[in-house]
Structure formats: structure tokens, C-alpha cells
Amino acid sequence: MTPRRRFRKPLAEFTGTMILLIFGTAVDCQVTLGSNRSIAGAEKGSFLSVCMGWGAGAAFGIWASASISGGHINPAVTLVHLLFRGFPLAQFFQYVIAQTAGAFTGSLLVYGIYNQAISVHEGGSAVRTTPGTASLFVTFPLDFMNAATCFFSELIVTAMLLFIVLTVTDRRNAMAPPSTLVPLIIFVAVVALTACFALQTGAAMNPARDFGPRVMTAIFYGRNVFTYRNHYWLWTPIIGDFLGAITGAFFYDLLIYTGDDSPITKLYGRPSGPLES
């Protein structure tokens, strides 16, 4: 078996996550940097642009990878499949590494494209501030936010995302869309969740989306991107998102899911009123 065939699924996850980060971080850069009159003569977008950019990145990333790897492009999604859908443990680690590498690569490409504009915005090529322009690539909380609120904000938004993902990919759900339309539904979900929850923490909803770019920004911005707010990166966009994903999956399987492969179904039985037609 050739390496390309052997690693086809992780490579698809790498590609899909890279697409997500290219769209998402690029729209962050364009909207923020475009508001600087030293860079652009007029604003180049709004918060709606940010929501649409991240949603489009998720949709195109899933469309590119779903037929090969399932289009997880998110370690939180992969963890849920491991814990609730019998996903292989060895493949879990391959996916997470590939997703993180894809996020790193996508954000690095965008940093290279916008490097000069960032220098103008910062006031010099040697100036890189945290949060400052580091927030174009990774998530940071608002100054007044305490750690507990940050954590639960990310937990809730990620739980909602995973609940939606499981809803639209559940083949036993008579209302589930055709598989080819799932990326479009995820586009709507990401746009809506970003529009509703991004104010306070940035609504990462995806550990790779934050950790991959955070490694990238550490190269150019220094270790402050990791030490900021007592290692905010670990407790909120990593642990918060993973626990949020588990929470969303738990409630979906407890309240809705009728399949036999879930440990929740095995433990509590099927909910009444199955969704099958």
C-alpha cells in the first residue's frame, strides 16, 4: 500500500481543516486590517463577513473531505465519534494530528499573505502584539470575562454545534438532509453560532482551529500566546470545546438517537418516538 493510499483519510482531514482556516483567518484579517485607513481606503467587511467566511470555510472543508474521511475537520467531532460511534482509537490520533497540522498550515499561509498589512497595522515589521493582531488567528476572551464564563461559553456553543452535526448526519432521522447538503447545513450552523456567541470568546468550537494557529503565532508573536490569562488556550478552546462536544453528543443520544452503537442507548435504552419514517 502506497503512503498516499495509507494516509488518505488523514490527508483529507488535513486538507479540509486547512481550507477552514484559510477562509476563516483570511476573513478575520481582511475585516480587521481593512478597517485601518492606512491600509485600505474603505472598510473591507463587517462582523457578518466574519460569520460568512468561517461558515464558508467549514462548508468547503467538509465538501472537500467528507467522501474520503467523513469530513470531521474538528478534533471535537472526531472525539464524539470515538466515544459515541465506535470510531477506531488509532485513527482518532491520526485525525487529530492531521487536523491540527492543517490548521497550522492554513493559518501560516494566511499570515504570509497578510504579513505586510499586519506590519502596517502594528506600526512596524518587528512589532507583533498579543492579543493585538494575534487575535486574527487565535481566540482570546474580552478583558472583563472571567475564566468560568469563558469556559462555559465555549462549552455551550460547541455542545450546540455537535448536537446539530449529529442531527443532520443521523441517517435514522427522517428529517436529515441528503449527505451532499450536510456542508450547507453546517455553513448555516457556523454562521448562526458565530453570530450569536463570538463576542466574548471568539467561539472557537474546534480545538484544532485554535491550537494549530496558536503554534503558528508562537513562532512570530512569542510564548505570550500560550501564557496569556493563565493558559487560557488550554482551559477554554481545548478542554472547554472537548467537554462541550461530549455534552452535545450525550444529550443528542439521550433525547433523540435510536441507534444501537451509542453507549447512551445501551445504558438507557432508546428514547420513545423514534425518528425513522
Image (cartoon, rainbow, N blue to C red):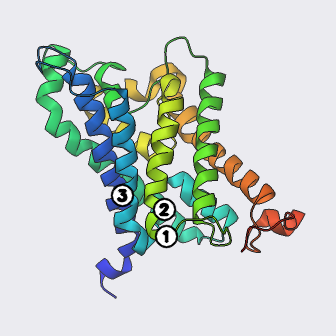
Residue 72 seen in the current view: no
Residue 145 x/y as whole percent: 57, 16
Q: Amino acid at mark 1?
A: Ser
- SS at mark 3? helix
> Can you tell which mark lies on residue 179?
1
Vertical arrangement, residue 164 with respect to residue 131, above or below: below
Give the residue number, with chain letter if any, for mark 3: 61
Name the front one of labels 3 and 2. 2
Residue 34 seen in the current view: yes
Mark 3 or mark 2, earlier in chain? 3
Q: Nearer the viewer, residue 56 or 264?
A: 56
Q: Amino acid at mark 2?
A: Val
Residue 61 figure quarter: bottom left
Number of residues whose C-alpha sits closer than 10 Å to that of mark 3, classed few (under 14), some (14–19) or many (20 or more): many
Q: Are the residues tagged 2 and 1 within 8 Å (C-beta)?
A: yes
- Picture quarter with the C terminus: bottom right
Vertical arrangement, residue 135 with respect to residue 212, above or below: above
Q: Is residue 273 left or right of residue 43?
A: right
Mark 1 or mark 3, earlier in chain? 3
Q: Are the residues tagged 3 and 2 within 8 Å (C-beta)?
A: no
